[in-house]
Amino acid sequence: MSEAMTLETAPAPVSTVPVKIRGDKVSVFYGEKQALFDVDLDIERNRVTSLIGPSGCGKSTFLRCLNRMNDTIDSCRVTGKIMLDNDDIYDRNIDVVELRARVGMVFQKPNPFPKSIYENVAYGPRIHGLAHSKAEMDEIVVSSLRRAGLFEEVKDRLDAPGTGLSGGQQQRLCIARAIATKPEVLLMDEPCSALDPIATAIIEELIDELRENFTIVIVTHSMQQAARVSQKTAFFHLGKLIEEGVTEEIFTNPVNKKTQDYITGRIG
Ligand SMILES: Nc1ncnc2c1ncn2[C@@H]1O[C@H](COP(=O)(O)OP(=O)(O)OP(=O)(O)O)[C@@H](O)[C@H]1O
């Protein structure tokens, strides 16, 4: 069966999970160069969605559209529509600072501020005015560190520099920092790529726990990781969303030949 016929005859995925983010014909240009082409992708609430595909296929570009991080790149232009619940996030009335508090981000390389562990976590809540007293701030810091699975390891040295922690601990600190502003969505751009297997396993376990309270979108180069942590997977190739669906289906029974070639290691 040809690829076109397969695509045309494939039934639309049916899902009853509420949609948190709806991407509608999202295209991204860096200057003259188009990096994403008409991507339609729904991100479901309280699920982990993995974005996978070969290097340069546009995974990070799409991820960065979801909290308008691409706005920081001068040459970058985004077209199409992205709805976060009922808000069009590219609407000119959207406050981008507020948007980034609702849609937090964790980067590839742990990047704690050169401040204490406590201050790393307190920073966001402070600039967003989320705590009205020291006691409230203490509560936010402790609960965020607990949720990030780090509190027990650092409770006796909250005044020590965040940069003095191990790589895996630093990444959990960055997760605590991201969740301290009580975001609805957490974006993770290859959050384990700088970590060893043990630290990676801890973060993966954490991702699974966090989805109870957050909607998570993760970019990963590791298909094993996508299979372990996500319920939905979207496969990108050369700036196009080729296929998306239930993770298990994507990895065991992909509809598109390109997806099949990628997961079997023939491309990428
Ligand atoms: N700031 C930028 N300026 C110009 N082009 C860019 C910029 N960022 C990304 N691109 C280009 O856009 C395309 C998609 O890049 P992107 O980083 O989104 O891909 P990716 O799938 O996340 O790749 P990787 O897995 O290597 O991180 C690539 O061709 C890349 O060179």
Image (cartoon, rainbow, N blue to C red):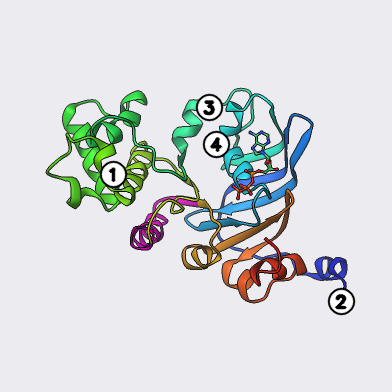
Horizontal side of 244 relative to 109 (left or right) equals: right
Tag 3 or tag 2, which sits nearer the N-term?
2
Q: CB atoms at circles 3 and 4 under 8 Å apart?
A: no
Tag 3 or tag 1, which sits nearer the N-term?
3
Look at the numbered disc 2 and give the secondary structure of its residue.
loop
Q: Give the prevailing secondary structure in the magenta stretch.
A: helix
Some atom of ligand 1 lies within 8 Å of the CB belonging to the residue at label 2: no
Q: Which residue is mark 3?
A: 96
Disc 4 residue type? Answer: Asn
Look at the numbered disc 4 and give the secondary structure of its residue.
loop
Pointer 3 local density, CA inside 10 Å: few below 14, some 14–19, many at least 20: some
Q: Which residues are magenta?
A: 197-216
Residue at mark 2 to residue at mark 1: CA–CA distance: 51 Å
Q: Residue 144: which numbered mark, if any?
A: 1
Q: CB atoms at circles 2 and 3 under 8 Å apart?
A: no
Where 244 falls versus 255 (above or below)?
above
Horizontal side of 261 relative to 96 (left or right) equals: right
Residue 157: give x, y in percent of width and height: 14, 40
Q: Which residue is mark 2?
A: 1
Please, which residue is most extreme toward the left here? 156
User: Is residue 92 in the magenta section?
Assistant: no
Quadrant of the rendered image containing residue 243: bottom right
Residue at mark 2 to residue at mark 3: CA–CA distance: 46 Å
Tag 4 or tag 3, which sits nearer the N-term?
4
Quadrant of the rendered image containing residue 182: top left
Give the position of the C terminus as an image quadrant.
Answer: bottom right
Q: In percent of the image, x 42 and y 40: which residue is there? A: 183
Tag 1 or tag 4, which sits nearer the N-term?
4
Q: In percent of the image, x 21 and y 33: which residue is there? A: 136
